[in-house]
Amino acid sequence: MGGGYGGVGRTILEVLKVSPKHQTVVLSRKKHDSVQVDYGSIDNLVSVLETHDIHTVICCFAVEGDSLAILQLNLIQAAINSTVTRRFVPSGFAIPYPQEVAGSSGDGETPVTSTYTFDLARYVVAMLDVKDWPEESRVVGDPVTWHEFVKAEEIRSKFEIIELPRHQTLYEHFPKKAFQWFMSIFELLAADGSSFITREGSPNERFPDMQPLTVREMLERLRISGVSASNDLT
Ligand SMILES: NC(=O)c1ccc[n+]([C@@H]2O[C@H](COP(=O)([O-])OP(=O)(O)OC[C@H]3O[C@@H](n4cnc5c(N)ncnc54)[C@H](OP(=O)(O)O)[C@@H]3O)[C@@H](O)[C@H]2O)c1
C-alpha cells in the first residue's frame, strides 16, 4: 500500500488485519514501521515490489503536489515493470461520506451516494480475492439527496449558510480562492448527478451479504457517540 498511513490507507489496513490470508507491506516516503521508498525512482520502486513479492498495489496517495501527476504514475510504471506485480488500484477514492461538516450543492434534490470509509475498505479487501477485475469498481453506500440528509439530521430549523469552519483552517495551506475553485468541482459533481452511483456492476452485486452503512445509521452513531453533526452543517 502506497500512502498506507493516511486516512483511507489506515482504514483499509485495519480491515486487512482481520484477513490473515493477505500480507501487507506499507510503502512510505518516511521511515515509519514500513518500507521507505523514493517515488521519484522507478528502479527503486521496482526493486521494492520484487523484493517483497507484491502482487497487488493499492495506492492511497493524497491529492497533493505532484502525488498523482508524477509519483503515482511512477508507481504504476514500476508495477508494470515488476515481474511479480499483477494488479494496481490507483488513488481515485472518491468517497463523499457524511462527516461532521456538510454543504448542500445544487437544489438539494439530486441523489449523492455516500459511502462509509470502512465499507469502502471492506469491499476493496473483498475484491482482492476476485479473479476478474473490471477496470473500474464503484462501491455503493447510501444514495440520498442533501434534503433527505438534512431531514435525517432534523436540523431544518437551524439551517444556516456560513463559511464552513473547517475550511478556514485550510486556507493557510490552500489559498481560499484556489480552494473554493477546487471544491466547486465536487459541488458541481454532487449537483449534476455524477455522484450518484448505480448498483449495476458494482462490488455490492458481487458481495450481496455485505451491507453498507446508511446515512441514517451513520448519523445515529454520531448521535450516540455524542458528536453533533448539526453544529457544522450549512
Ligand atoms: N479521507 C477521506 O475522507 C477521503 C474522502 C474522499 C476522498 N478521499 C481520497 O482518498 C485518497 C487518499 O486520501 P487520504 O485522506 O487517505 O489522504 P491523506 O491521509 O492526506 O494522505 C495519504 C498518504 O498520501 C501520501 N502522500 C501525501 N502527499 C504525497 C505526495 N506529495 N507524494 C506521495 N505521497 C504522498 C502520504 O504517505 P507517506 O507520507 O507515508 O508517504 C500520506 O499518508 C485521496 O485520493 C483522497 O482524495 C479521501
Image (spheres, rainbow, N blue to C red):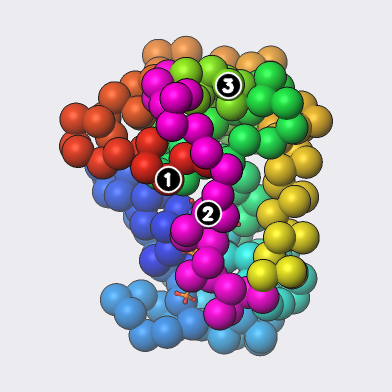
The residue shown at (35%, 28%) is 219
Q: Quadrant of residue 194?
A: top right
The residue that mark 3 highlights is 147
Q: Is residue 136 above or below residue 17?
A: above
The residue that mark 1 highlights is 232
The residue shown at (66%, 25%) is 108
Q: Position of residue 170 (x, y in %)?
A: 54, 70
What span is in magenta?
Answer: 152-175
Q: Residues within 10 Å of mark 1 (few under 14, many from 20)?
A: some
- Which of the two labelled residues, at mark 1 and mark 3, occupies the earlier sequence position? 3
Q: Is residue 7 above or below residue 140?
A: below
Whether ligand 1 has any atom under 8 Å from the Cβ at mark 1 is answered as no
The residue shown at (57%, 65%) is 62
The residue that mark 2 highlights is 164
The residue shown at (66%, 85%) is 40
Q: Nearer the viewer, residue 154 or 219?
A: 154
Q: Is residue 222 left or right of residue 197?
A: left
- Which of the two labelled residues, at mark 2 and mark 1, occupies the earlier sequence position? 2
Tell me if I can see residue 46 in this picture: no
In the structure shown, which secondary structural element does the residue marked by tag 1 occupy? helix
C-alpha span from label 2 to label 1: 7 Å
Q: Position of residue 129 (x, y in %)?
A: 48, 35
Do the residues under discs 2 and 1 have CB atoms within 8 angstroms? yes
Q: Nearer the viewer, residue 218 or 157?
A: 157
Q: Is residue 190 left or right of residue 230?
A: right
